[in-house]
Structure formats: C-alpha cells, structure tokens
Image (cartoon, grey):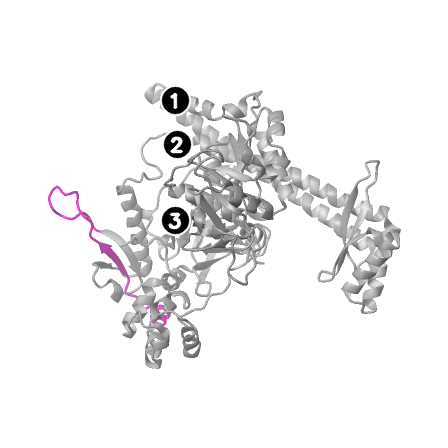
Amino acid sequence: MDQKRELSSIDLAALVTELNRYEGAKVDKAYLYDDDLLRLKLRDFDRGRVELMIEVGDVKRAHAADPAHVADAPGRPPNFAKMLRNRMSGADFAGVEQYEFDRILTFEFEREDGNTTLVAELFGQGNVAALDETGEVIGALSTVRLKSRTVAPGSQYEYPASRLNPLDVSYGGFERHMRESDSDVVRTLATQLNLGGLYAEEVCTRAGVPKETPIEEATDDQLRALHDALARIDERLRSGDVDPRVYEESVEGDGTDGDGGEPRVVDVTPFPLAEHEDLPSVGFDSFNDAVDEYFHRLGSEATDDGEAPADAGSSRPDFEEEIAKQERIIEQQKGAIEGFEEQAQAERERAELLYANYDLVDEVISTVREARENEVPWDEIEATLDAGAERGIEAAQAVVGVDGGEGTVTVELDEEGDDGGTTRVELDASEGVEVNADRLYREAKRVEEKKAGAKEAIESTREELEAVKERKREWEEQQAADEGGDADDEGDADEEYETDWLSRSSIPIRSPDDWFERFRWFRTSTGYLVIGGRNADQNEELVKKYMSKHDRFFHTQAHGGPVTILKASGPSESADPVDFSEETLREAAQFAVSYSSDWKDGRGAGDAYMVEPDQVSKTPESGEYIEKGSFVIRGDRTYFEDVPCRIAVGVQCEPVTRAIGGPPSAIVDRAAAHVTFEPGMYAQNDAAMMAYRTLKERFADQSFVRKVASADRLQEFLPPGGSDIVD
C-alpha cells in the first residue's frame, strides 16, 4: 500500500478544530528548511512551546509538532523567513480556517502595527503566501502567474476556483450532482463530489451501497443513504468527535530469521475507517498528535531506507550550488533594475511625446469623445477614422488602434530627433491630453519605486551570498585542520572545472551549421534530436519530409501546438527501432506542451500524447476538412499528463558554441550558463532581453555571448506569449 504523503480535505477539516485551541499563542520566530518546510515557533500561556509546521513540497502537511520531532534551526534565514520574523514576531495567533473544501489553510496573526495572514496551499505544487490586512501578497515561497489566478508580491491574493463541499451540500444538490454523472457511484463521489478515492470508498461502505453501482441504477434510497453517511462524517468533524488512527503495514524482513521487519506507517485518519479494518493501527488522543507522529515516522523510515537526512554526517555541503544560486538571483535582480530604468524612461518619453504633439492628440481625443457623447458606436468611430486617414487627415492617420471594450485609442507619434522613429501611445479617450500624460508620468514613478525595492533586495541577497561564502571558508578551514586539506583540494578542482567557461577572458567560437536549426529543436538529455514546427508550413514539412518510421510523433491536447518529432536518427541515416527511455519521452512531451497554446494562455502545465508515425495521416474522414499543418491521428495514443510548462535557454561552449533552449533537464548540464522560464507577464522579446543580460553578466568574455547568444537568437527558443524567469 502506498504511504500517504498529503493531507486530505477531510483531514484538514479535523485539524482546524484542534489547531484553533492554540489561539492566543505568541509568535517567537519563523524558520524555513529546504524552501518548502516552514516552522513557526510559538509560546502558549498554558502549553508552553508550540511548533507549527507547514510543509508544501513532496510531503504536504500542517500541524503542531512535538518539539522532540523538530530539527535544529537551519543557518542564516532566507528572505522569506526574515520577512515573516519582521512582520510576525510577537504577534498573536488568531485562528485558522480551511478555505471551503479545498486543501488550503488560512492562518491569521494579529499585531498592533499590522495583521498578517498566511495561506498554506497543500495541493498541486504547494505554496505558502503571506498577505497584509488588505489581502495583498507580501511574499510567497513560489510566484504563480496563471490565466486563472496570480500569487505574486504586490498583487491581491486569488484563491483557486471554488469546489463543491460534499459534507454540507443539501440532499437536493447532492442528488442533482450524482444523477448528472455517467459513471458509477464511487467514481462520482471521488471526482464530482471531491471526496477522493479513499473516502469515496469509505462512504459507500458505511452506506451499504456497492461501489461499482452505475449511477443510472442507483435507487433514491441508496442516494439518501450515501448523503446520510456524509452528514454523519460532517457532524463528527464539526463537533471534534474524533478517534484518530495511525495505520501500519508489515514489511518483509531481511530474510535472515524469517521474521518480518518493523511495520511502516501508511495512513493517518481522524477516525477509524472500514476500508482499513484489515490493517493494524495505533490510537491517539488528538488528531494533531496522530498527524505529527505519522509524518515523523514517515521521515524516519525514508532515512532508514537509505535517503540521507539533510544534516547527515560530515559530507561536504554543496556551497557552490548555493553560491551560484545567490549569484543568479543577483544577476536577475540587476536585469530587473535595468529593465525598470528602461521602462520608466519609456513612459516619460511617451508623456513628453503627448505634449510635443498636443494639438494632434487633442484633436483625436476630442473627435472620439464627441462621437461617444452622440452615442456613436465604437465600430463606426473606427470606420470614420479609417476613412479620414484615407483622405489624408493627419489626426486620423495617427490612429492605429481603437478598443471599444477598454474605451481607448492608440496613436503612433513621431519621435523627436533625426532617427525618424515612431512610438505608439494608448490613450484613454474619455480624458484630455494632460490627464493621459499624467498617467504615464505616474506609471514611470511607480516603476522607479519598484527599482528602489529591487536595489534593496540586491543588498539583502549580497548579504546572503557573503554569509554562504563565510560558511564555506569556515568549513574548509575546519576540514584542513582535521584532514590535511585533501577534501578542499578536490572541491576547489571541481569548482574550477565547472566555472572555467565563465571565467575565461576569451572563448573561441565554433559555430555549427546544422540542418534542423531553422525549426524549433533541442537534444534530449540522452542525446536524441527533437524538432518542432514554428508554423503550419513547417508542421507539414516535418511530417512529410523528416519523419521516419522509427521516430515518435508528439502533440498537445490543447489546440495550437506544434508538430513535435522525436528522431531516432538523422535525415539521411538509416534507423533501427529505438527503445526510448521514459525521461527522453517526457522531455519531448514537455517540449510540445511548452511551445503550445498552454504557455500562451498562462497555464502552468498541460497534457500531450505520443503516437507512431504510421498513425499520422493527411487523409480526413469523408466530408471532413484538414487545415494546413494539421493531421488526422488514428489508433491508440500514449498520454503524458500534467507536464510542466518550463523552458531553459542557455549558452553552450563545447563541443560547439551556440545558444540552446528546451526542457530544463536537457539544457542545464549541456549549457555553461542558463536561465529557466515559466509562463508569465513579460513579452517574448522582453524576456529574451532579460535572459541575454543575465547570461552576459555571468561570462567574463561578454563579447562571446553577444556573438553566439544575442537576444534575437535566444528569442527563437522562447515560446510565444508571456514569460517569467524562474528563481
């Protein structure tokens, strides 16, 4: 039986009641372990020391822990932990709530100078966000920028879309949701009613309803029994009537004496489950204690199975990785400052252009405003302006866009100077020239304020970097004293090898001339070539000219993805059947997803499928039509679900020198320096410029980067749509 690694919605409902018993406890300090485990040390008047643990990595949990189960405090606190200490030290714990029936807990802390909310997202990738009294995000472990929601500093926190709560739904609502399903009872409870597999089976067992009963065959009495079983679970949770259990499972011994080994934990529940009646269990006085014991044993068993604990032995800490991480952050912050400066300057120049072309801009705004006052539709206004432009009316010729939904017009104005350039400025048609110019000046000021914040962040990161370097020096001095410095020599040799390309003052350029470079492409971590189309014509060409019988064809479930081919050989080589590794296939699937509409729409992940070449055809069914670049797929498909949208771009120095890009797992080890992106807010050309600046600063030979990995070349590897650099 698989071991439970995440708390369920029902588990969290039971925990909330018990955690609220610590209301009034004062926050002492905040600690962060490994970027995904947050520890809040509190002091309770009656109970003494209270350790609140929130973990959002591979394991997802939130509970108060026995101090004996808490690891020693880590070293210098990272920025997120320092921010929490500044805002929350001395604050009172005011309570915790579960957000609807989701795996989200909202912790409230009150202090005279300001309250703080911690939102723990115990689902998906996991996250912890700190909010101020207005709900604005102050900081988060992970930045989220999706089409459906945003979690980023400075933005209002957005919860995920609401889910049905099966524990408090009325019988009428319950019956309606069940009857709308075309599946069986247990699957409907698990998915449509959001119970999950285990508790869906438990409810069926308690109600005496066979799990595989098709919905259309379920009687009204059976639905009523299921609803009553849910109501009884809800009543127990609300009243705190729990009988917690940690379930165990025997494991085989080492075979030396015929006995089984020590039992391992497999589940923790707030009350006994009929579905686990064949498993031994241990009872606890509180569900919180049971959860604490379960996850403590889960971690200990992982260590016993050979996974080294974080502080194991005296092995050399990976100082280089931490130093490189802090240096990357500084480089990104420098690039952000440079970008803020350029953005602020651009906004000011737009405002000045409005004043330099005051009469023309005023005529445009006055014309549109007068038409709107006379209730002229926006499409007629646009048509009138187009007609005026054809007649040579200067004001009409300046208009290059009309957006009735936003109430704006966009004008293109000649820049000052001799270069003959133009700049586009979006105008609020309901306001005058001065108000529009003032809006641009205010935006420039706001961006400059962000620049000031970025400068402060750089200083903080530099302090972090110096602290890591100091810890490295201290460790090496201690090792030299204990072991004669052998470990130091080996470590220094490794560091020199890894950073050699970055520190060389001159890097020779060895430009390749490969046939596939006009397509999207990358080489997998196992060395196979993957190519994808940039447009419909290239999609057609790849399938007709470059796809061989032993290749694999990939495409996304979302519309608007490129044809992606995993090559078994080169275009003029004979190929044998290839048993591609799972890693290779997933990298090709990630490539297909990342360059599809999933990225452009801001999704964090998407689904892809794979087929054999002989399943791909241009022959449609009778009466159907196939667009250019599209194909008919026949037969079974192999699916890759929830593939992350992530792309890395970087600079390759050997055996050839060039810009490369693709799934991070295929790029990181091949590039001397790289930058990773996820869907975000920066336009493709802006993101390419950010990557170029970041990479250029990492090389001593910056002219080399300019020649082989300019912003234009890096842009070829970035997906269409917005992007953000991943820290």
Check disc 1 and report its element: helix, strand or loop. helix
C-alpha separation, residue under disc 3 versus residue under disc 2: 22 Å
Check disc 2 and report its element: helix, strand or loop. loop
The mark found on residue 37 in the picture is none
Of residues 396 and 206, which is closer to you in this image? 396
**x, y (%) of residue 703?**
63, 25
- To which residue does mark 2 refer? 317
Is any part of residue 362 visible from this angle? no
Whichever of callouts 1 and 2 sits on the residue coming sooner in the sequence is 2
Main SS class of the magenta portion in the image? loop
Range drawn in magenta: 234-263
- To which residue does mark 3 refer? 58
Q: Residues within 10 Å of mark 2 (few under 14, many from 20)?
A: few
C-alpha separation, residue under disc 1 versus residue under disc 2: 13 Å
- To which residue does mark 1 refer? 490
**Residue depicted at x 81% and y 66%:** 372
In the displayed structure, 602 sits above or below 622; it is above
Instruction: Tell me the amino acid under the disc marked 3.
Output: Asp
